[in-house]
Image: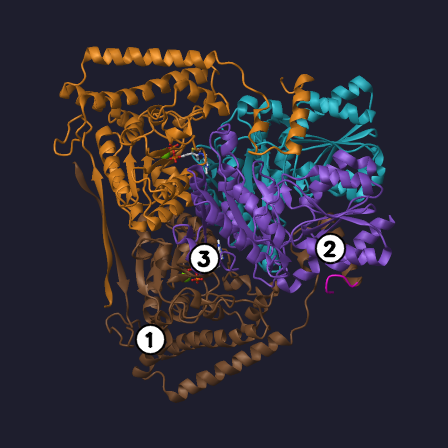
Chain colours: A cyan, B purple, C brown, D orange
Amino acid sequence: MPKINMVQAINLALRQEMAKDPNVIVLGEDVGVDGGVFRVTEGLHEQFGERRVIDTPLAESGIMGVSIGMALSGLKPVAEMQFDGFSYLMIPQLEGNASRYRSRSQGLWTVPLVVRMPYGGAVRALEHHSESREATYATFPGVKVVIPSGPRNARALLVAAIRDPDPVVFMEPKRVYRAFREDVPEEEETMEIGKAQVVQEGGDLTVISWGAMSHITRQAIDEVQKRRGAKIEHIDLLSIAPMDTDTISNSIRKTGRCVIVQEAPRSFGVSSEITARINDNVLLYLEAPVKRITNYDVVTPYFGRELKYIPDQQRIERGIEETLEF
Amino acid sequence: MPKINMVQAINLALRQEMAKDPNVIVLGEDVGVDGGVFRVTEGLHEQFGERRVIDTPLAESGIMGVSIGMALSGLKPVAEMQFDGFSYLMIPQLEGNASRYRSRSQGLWTVPLVVRMPYGGAVRALEHHSESREATYATFPGVKVVIPSGPRNARALLVAAIRDPDPVVFMEPKRVYRAFREDVPEEEETMEIGKAQVVQEGGDLTVISWGAMSHITRQAIDEVQKRRGAKIEHIDLLSIAPMDTDTISNSIRKTGRCVIVQEAPRSFGVSSEITARINDNVLLYLEAPVKRITNYDVVTPYFGRELKYIPDQQRIERGIEETLEF
Amino acid sequence: MPLTMAGEFSTSYLQILDESGEVDRELEPKLSDAELLRFYRAMYLSREADQRMLKMQRQGRIGTFGPGTGQEAAFCGPTFALTDKDWLLGSFREPGARFMRGEPLSTALLYYNGYEEGNALSPDKRTLPIAVIVASQTLHAVGIAYSMQYQGQKDSAALVFLGDGASSQGDFHEALNFAAVWQAPVVFVVQNNQWAISVPRSKQTHSRTIAQKAIAYDMPGIQVDGNDALAMYQATKEALARAHSGGGPTLIEAVTYRLMMHTTADDPKKYRTEKEEKDWWSKEPLVRFEKYLRDKGVLDDKAKATIEAETRQYIDEEIKKFETRTTFKPDASFDYVFGTTHAEIEKQRAEFLATLNQGGADA
Amino acid sequence: MPLTMAGEFSTSYLQILDESGEVDRELEPKLSDAELLRFYRAMYLSREADQRMLKMQRQGRIGTFGPGTGQEAAFCGPTFALTDKDWLLGSFREPGARFMRGEPLSTALLYYNGYEEGNALSPDKRTLPIAVIVASQTLHAVGIAYSMQYQGQKDSAALVFLGDGASSQGDFHEALNFAAVWQAPVVFVVQNNQWAISVPRSKQTHSRTIAQKAIAYDMPGIQVDGNDALAMYQATKEALARAHSGGGPTLIEAVTYRLMMHTTADDPKKYRTEKEEKDWWSKEPLVRFEKYLRDKGVLDDKAKATIEAETRQYIDEEIKKFETRTTFKPDASFDYVFGTTHAEIEKQRAEFLATLNQGGADA
Ligand SMILES: Cc1ncc(C[n+]2csc(CCOP(=O)(O)OP(=O)(O)O)c2C)c(N)n1
Ligand SMILES: Cc1ncc(C[n+]2csc(CCOP(=O)(O)OP(=O)(O)O)c2C)c(N)n1
Ligand SMILES: [Mg+2]
Ligand SMILES: [Mg+2]
């Protein structure tokens, strides 16, 4: 199996799905000739032509709106938002139409599309290029929100998203794009949307993370395990909506302790939702409050300060240790 | 004190603030000659003229964008979104600009504006006129989200919102608009944004509600108290963001039991955030899991079905009793 | 070259059947008697359905709706020009157009009574459900048009209706721009009925015509008498022919008037004069079309009476069908959140059903 | 009236100083020698600052930025026409314009080094911070223009820059529409530099000119040689005069070219030819303006050398200032979420500061 990074893995998923299904279409700003500002769609334009890999005008609501029309009429658009910071322009079309057509028409009309976007911070970018707003998208029923954490699950989840019958917001942690490589098989591989992955089993404490936080969390866990000999279970959430409550509940039943690592501000984020579900389902198993290691409720600072705000390995280690000791 | 309904109370707040401060400007679709589709701005056009009460073109992003410009240059715009279902069109301007100018410029530039909108269900309306998406707005740091529950607090909070230095999303539960009357003083009255109100004290259990749910929750509490003689504390949240954690925590410390009533779908809503804050601050005081009485994670049904989905008095009573008995 | 010309443009206006019902012979479209009658019936049904629905709304038998009265030519004309290979997208003020595409009145009534089951037109009819968010549907039309182009369905174009108010939305601009760049087979029909609820056309946009907005995209644009059924048909026919032959999109402005309230929740007395309404009643589309048909010998009193009776009968039957419907599955909303099954949704469904059984939530 | 004319429109093109530096005497604006030199210096500083910032970016001393090289006339010309009662709003490709409005280079460098402290221009300068979300600022300009009108500040208009790509956004349409309906004193300057990152003008919109988009709003629109400093100045001057005297908004299209990369993260070789770039280098704005000044006797080798030296010195000093700055308050983000104090934010601030002290988060 070749070792590739997340950019290459996503490219592989797109290339293979496009080769397989002529209805799969890629569109967005600079996705064609340029191959995308992060080079995620590189080579697709040459291979599949400009009818299938479309450099659109600069209008995110437009991109989403035409994608909905394409999806309603038999195509499978994979739209790119150049950055999640500009993706809010498509919320009205997502909320108002993509998420509703199935329910509106009792299943007669559906909108199978994927909207990919790089998201998250720590890449020394300009304003609007560093937020982590997965929770905003998760407030819309009828929308699936998927976040891979590494090359292999990015490839498998994107294939699943393209084949999924519903609109999927696919958020790619840009900090991970070229951060590390993994073995990714050439042969088809998919993962089920709506399922979390237990990346490591353990009985003493559960750590839940997603996106760019998963890699760093993994390192923090290794460190604490080495230091303390504790057995820590690590869950990579992967699907924000629908969320896999059962995997979380089962883990808490076993460990009784939970740490959640979230790149986004603390309030109204995914960690709030996970905590609420733990309350609803397994509160009585808890031996300590759920520990939420998060960013703060501030407007995302420019890059000069941002690393001070995003959870880092030390904060995660400390959070795990405090919760083990509670 | 005259007894007036919420529509009249909001109108009173607007009228008095406009009379007091010539920089206060009202704008939106049909807010002028027509007096608003709910008659909230009735009479303002006649009294203050078309330069201060502006019938805008039909474009929500436009309304928000020009309001930001007005706020940046000394005016105090109070913009109306005709329904929250169309308000998502202004999210890009709210998220990208209104919420950020203060932080972006380290306080040099600020955007003091109010964006009012009717929201919520149970009024037999067409699609897009029944959602309860306060949590979506609460995911944006820098934005205040305020929800009154009755005529008196609507008036007082709107006055506070107009005088507030920050962008305030003011969500008016349209089900309450004409549902009941309250004594509302002619004289100025304001309430602090960011504070919840303990509308009734009690030691056995805490119930938290906001918006249209508060009235119905109040009735459920009365019923359960009558039936059981329990003493129930009722908190009306009023501010969704920033949220008043302390009032909630203090109450839980006292009661150890909590029920939250939420009109919105269960996941990624305000009740998740409250539950998470209870976890963070007062988990060890809990004698039962927090009970969340909510809508479900479905696309808001058309009005033929919607009443089956929104929490009603019976569900709330049952939830309170189960939590008392836990 | 100091101050020179960078471009010259013009916008034209089409009328075939004037206010008094006189036809321009040169421009008159060639339609058979049967076609003309079908056309007339469609407009007549739309008008009659409005009247009956208005009564039903006042009696609480259906919820809010927006009547199309006065605009029958503007929405039936373009629809009459479509084939069933073309797509139709609308907003909420084209009742007759939806009937022409095969939607039974009973289904429309279900929609206005708060049931998603009222959006039941099969996708093979190529007619999308009502779009409430104004202008949002214009982009869907462009996407569909792209699909047709991509799939080589040369006979298929997308026609999309919107209002003058909707033309202020950013989505409308983005749709026109995408359509022009892609030369997509799509026809935009703006029903300029002079009002967006209480906001008059003059406060909506500063341009003399809405048709001239096409110039911003170097797209053909034409202003049409929207109360002239023949002109609306003809303008659309030409736009569709262009679209089908690879000639790209067209913008049509239908100059018409909303003769009734915005919706049943609205009171036009608050913002416009009865005189204005009366003036426009004198230009309304049905009378004029009827005169044309009578002049042409296609319609006489007897034929008219038959149409009236048949229409009434159809409406009666459909209302009966609507009112004797069986009840609907309460938990349908759980079926259609996603196309896949998820544990959390199913858990909530069980909770919902249990609550219903406990007698909560007006079971 | 069957097929008649509903409107005729045209768009004109202005050039005063042609590619070879020849001036049209009739159209030549009356500027004093001192003014002309100030104008030239502004353009020259912008060009030089780009060069130095590029080096700094490559050395990791600042982050990503988008050079303005080649467009100096397009953004300095309009800015030169403003008074300090007018407002300026831009996107991110008008460095020289911001300097003209009083922004020190050291401040700009702070911005590009990831500090909000780089947006430090005092509001009384009436120049807004850089707007990254393309076209979003066009609506703010209209709101500000409305304020000026409302407050009776007759000498104040708002000028807003955007790119050709930004013209595809819905917000641009909404801004033009609001501005025209309100006859607001605002001037829209589209810097049509032929590219939006890798997307050429021809894929961005189908219209021959961007200026003609004004027709959609019955607004004056003009296409200008955007590499001609005099024409850009003059066109803006006239638009401002109209705005100041209640004549409403204007759309100006500046036909120019982005001679360098989109931003330092971009590689134009991927999508355009070096020949195209070379062709546009031959039309660039500084050379031609310099020739005009020399022909006019306003500039000679000695004066040029002085400008060069002074500019270099200014840039050196500003870079030094930037690099010897004191460090910034780490918890500033907590100060500026809201203008009021809230318990939860303060609690989190305490947690943040405690974490910093524990040595977490690259303290
Ligand atoms: C985006 C959006 N904003 C607001 C509304 C509320 N609304 C419904 S119809 C309407 C007026 C529409 O005017 P126009 O487009 O001219 O269509 P008409 O009603 O005249 O047919 C408004 C404001 C809406 N449906 N969508
Ligand atoms: C709404 C939005 N979408 C995407 C981007 C990312 N982006 C930054 S600049 C740019 C191209 C802008 O082109 P144009 O408006 O022509 O300005 P130019 O860069 O040529 O000066 C893009 C796509 C953005 N800043 N804002
Ligand atoms: Mg209208
Ligand atoms: Mg450009």
Ligand 3 neighbours mark 1 (CB distance < 8 Å): no
User: Which sits in the foreground, A111 or B62?
Assistant: B62
Circles 3, 2 touching at the beta carbon (< 8 Å): no
In this rendering, is residue C89 above or below C215?
Answer: below
Q: Residues within 10 Å of mark 1 (few under 14, many from 20)?
A: few
Q: Residues within 10 Å of mark 2 (few under 14, many from 20)?
A: some
Q: Chain of mark 1?
A: C
Could you tell me residue A274's position as x and y percent? 72, 39
User: Which sits in the foreground, A2 or B217?
Assistant: B217
Q: Chain of mark 2?
A: B
Measured Cα–Cα span from mark 3 to mark 1: 27 Å
Task: Say what amino acid the circle numbered 2 marks.
Answer: Arg
SS for tag 1?
loop
Give me the disc on residue C282.
Answer: 1
In this rendering, is residue A58 above or below D112?
Answer: below
Could you tell me residue D291's position as x and y percent? 18, 21
In the image, taking residue A164 as reference, residue C11 lies left or right, namely left
Mark 2 highlights which residue? B218
Question: Looking at the image, is mark 2 or mark 1 nearer the viewer?
Answer: 2
Q: Is there any visible trace of residue C40 in the rendered image? A: yes
Could you tell me residue B15's position as x and y percent? 49, 52
Where, quadrant-wise, is the N terminus of chain C in this rendering? top left
Task: Say what amino acid the circle numbered 1 marks.
Answer: Ser
Mark 3 highlights which residue? B30
Ligand 1 neighbours mark 3 (CB distance < 8 Å): yes
Measured Cα–Cα span from mark 3 to mark 2: 34 Å
Write down the region rendered in magenta: C359-363
User: Which sits in the foreground, D363 or C180?
Assistant: D363
Circles 2, 1 touching at the beta carbon (< 8 Å): no
Q: Is circle 3 on the same chain as circle 2?
A: yes
Is residue B312 rendered magenta in the image? no
